[in-house]
Amino acid sequence: MKIAIIGGGLAGLTAAAYLSSESDTEGTVFERSPQLGGRAFTYEKSGFTLNYGAHAVYGIDRHTLLHMEQELNLKFQSKQVDKRKVMYAKHGQLTPAPLDFVNIVKTDVLTATEKMKFVGEIAKIIGNIHQLKHHQTLGDYLDHSHASADIKELWAHLVCSNFFIAPEDARKVSGAVIADYYHNLFLSQKPVNYILGSWATITDQLIEKINENEHWEIALKEPVESITMEDGKFILNTKARQQLVYDQVIFAMPVQQAVKMLESTPWMTSLEPYKESTSTEVLVYDIGFSKVVARPFHYISDMDNKMFISDVSATDYTVAPVHGQLLQGIAYLNDDFSDEEQKKQYLEQKTQRMEALFDTYYPGWRDHVEVKRVSKKAMVSSVKNIHGNKLLPTHLQGVPFYFCGDGCVGKGELAERAFSSARTVAQSILAKKVNVKAHS
């Protein structure tokens, strides 16, 4: 069986690693960029490792990476963020983030009575009996809830933080999705971990797995331009090569790109429900310091300005030189603008607010900057997880391709959905191959 995988991000590499592990398969991973990894691309500058996508993993002890570690023999280490050093900032005051029962007792975000009520909410989610799962959206649940304004604000802020979206969008996230996400997270013994060495630790091993099969190739800077089907075979054309024949094709790319590529094909009708899905974009501000500027906390989530700062190097020592420090600031963005000028001004204001946050909690930081990168529209998820958007199934009835990525149906959120959907697709194709052999 000859397989084409269009896209060399986390999903494409995962699918290829599973499929290439079978000696009687052959295939090509097509990647339009000069490097692999997609939004998990990692690069080094002046001794600092910068990630286009955050390499934090939520609930790693219940994560798809555990299956991949065993099935693909991956080797990696991770380190948990110190929950006692995760802070919320509200009205200029720092207080422990209510991440577990210990911090809930310590936090000033809620009153004593509210803390008891919030603990009850967590217990119901762990027991999978919380009413949230029966509501269409978080906003719908909060509108019907008798909770205090502070508890409602905390719910919206938690969803902002975990789904990387603005408060207005947080209220649009499906209640069932939120309940399932926190059910998994609250049961985790390791709620937030960093992969030591960043995503490159995983992607480099996946690439190595693919290269072990001499019948597989990785084609960089070679985007697929068109795809047709003749006599049950798929014909792909790129700028470099024409009339490439494959038995199966996997789209491992943002949903919007897959829809665009199939726009003028007979299969577009089936993809219509997914063409209007919007992506999740954030402002990312990375700064590397020549020395540690301050480290009484590892993570600050500003509830007033809807942004946060992670001291990434406090958990993953590999991302900064000895005695150095790497911070990553994230601002949740609205995407409702009347014109580009309004959007430009909004992003500039967000950048200034982020720098003001650095000034407040890392005083003197400007004197020690070695590396700085500001990405004003970084895509963290190809489909914003709000009611009205639809995740693309890994296989659509009447469409002969497979789909995988963080915008597809799968387990978890963000990177885990890319891993899990790719694993599902690869297992489906391999099972199909076995069935064909059995009947031939």
Image: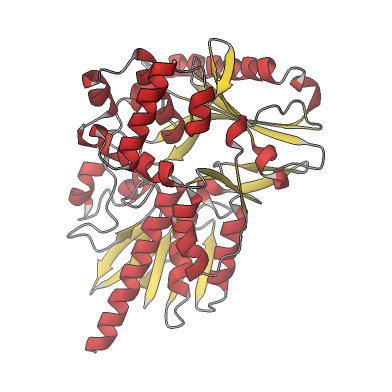
Is 20 situated left or right of 52 in this image?
A: left
Which residue is depicted at the point 66% across and 41% down? 315
Measuring from the top left, give residue 268's x and y in whole percent. Answer: 22, 50
Which residue is depicted at the point 47% across and 39% down? 380
Above or below for 379 versus 232: above
Above or below for 242 versus 21: above
Q: Residue furthest bottom?
A: 440
Measuring from the top left, give residue 406's x and y in whole percent. Answer: 40, 48
Front residue of 392 and 31 = 392
Front residue of 65 and 321 = 65
Above or below for 352 versus 159: above
Measuring from the top left, give residue 167's x and y in whole percent. Answer: 39, 22
- Residue 27 picture quarter: bottom left
Is 354 situated left or right of 101 in this image?
A: right
Quadrant (top left/top right/bottom left/bottom right) for the N terminus: bottom left
Is 171 situated left or right of 419 in this image?
A: left
Residue 141 appears anywhere in the view: yes
